[in-house]
Amino acid sequence: MKTCYYFGLFIGLWMQSLVVFSQEIIVKGTYQGKNVYIHNPLTNDQKNYCIQAVYLNGNLIVRNPRTSSFEVNLAAFSIGNSVEIKIVHSEGCKPKIINPWVLKGQGNFKFISFTADEKNLNWSVEGETANSVYYVERMVNNNWTNVTTIQAQNPQITNTYTYPITHNVGLNKYRIKHQERSGQITYSDILDYSFTQGMVKFYPRNVSNKIYFTADVSYEISNNKKEVVKKGKGKEVDVSNLPRGVYFISFDNRTEQFLKK
């Protein structure tokens, strides 16, 4: 019985020593398709390696690795899966993840604002990382098209950017794509900006005889059945022969509605 007692006491003291003389490094992020590499230095006495254990999402995957560096295989994860690596190591030495950028930090980067005026696009961000890139995109024929690429500034708590832009007349749609060195992509909200300077207008909207445009345009007029009843080009169009009702007039890359009295 005494032997069992002393053995239990020894185990208890040994476990306490592990708690006292062990430290932890915890890294959280999302999987981006690449494995993590860890540097494992020697302890202060140069007799043992620093790392005692490595846990991946709570599961023990490595115990007392006897090598100066090793790979944590993340191939079982899907892109975007959450990853937590916990490194338990001896006191007085510090392991290091060699390529921390391959794990996208959770909640680090975000767009704070995205606005436009007559001449510029403006956006502010938080949590920017070194060597990341911005792609300014605009909607063209229902497809996102890259306008320019901008290298990120030196990372600070917040950064602000301004890019000069020439808007198309009418509704413009923009977004900013941010890509980090790891490949992680974050999009801003889509920004709608209506540019009316130089926009062709028509009048009146309740018409008996003629519709007038503020400039020469090509136009089409259709009824509620989407049948084209009149088309042409010019600064005015005679609609006196159209039956009463609601019509749609398409011009200058947009469609508007009018009432024929």
Image (cartoon, helix red, strand yellow):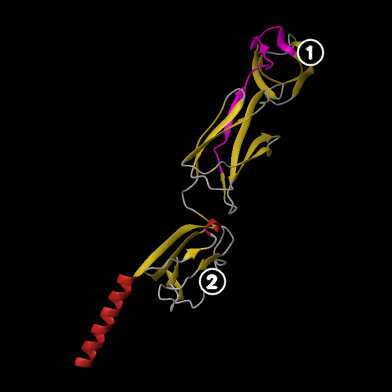
Against 144, residue 86 (above or below) is below
Q: Secondary structure at mark 2?
A: strand
Query: Which quadrant of the rendered structure holds the C terminus?
Result: top right
Q: Amino acid at mark 1?
A: Gly
Disc 2 crowd rating (10 Å Cα; few below 14, some 14-19, many 20+) is some
Q: Position of residue 186 (x, y in %)?
A: 56, 45
What's the mark number on residue 245? none
Badge 2 or badge 1: first in the primary sequence: 2
Q: Farthest residue to the top: give it.
A: 209
Against 198, residue 76 (above or below) is below
- Residue at coordinates 42% horizontally, 62% vertically from top-left? 26
- Residue at coordinates 23% horizontally, 92% vertically from top-left? 3
- Residue at coordinates 71% horizontally, 11% vertically from top-left? 214
Residue 15 sits in quarter:
bottom left
Against 198, residue 36 (above or below) is below
Query: Which quadrant of the rendered structure holds the N terminus?
Result: bottom left
Q: Secondary structure at mark 1?
A: strand
Residue 172 appears in the figure = yes
Q: Farthest residue to the right: give it.
A: 232
Against 53, residue 204 (above or below) is above
Per the image, the residue denoted by label 2 is 70
Q: Which residues are magenta?
A: 187-215
Label 2 and label 1: CA atoms lie apart by 74 Å
- Residue at coordinates 62% horizontally, 24% vertically from top-left? 119
Is 208 magenta? The answer is: yes
Q: Position of residue 179 (x, y in %)?
A: 59, 47
Is 180 magenta? The answer is: no
Q: Amino acid at mark 2?
A: Phe
Q: Position of residue 8 (x, y in %)?
A: 25, 85
Residue 261 appears in the figure = no
Per the image, the residue denoted by label 1 is 234
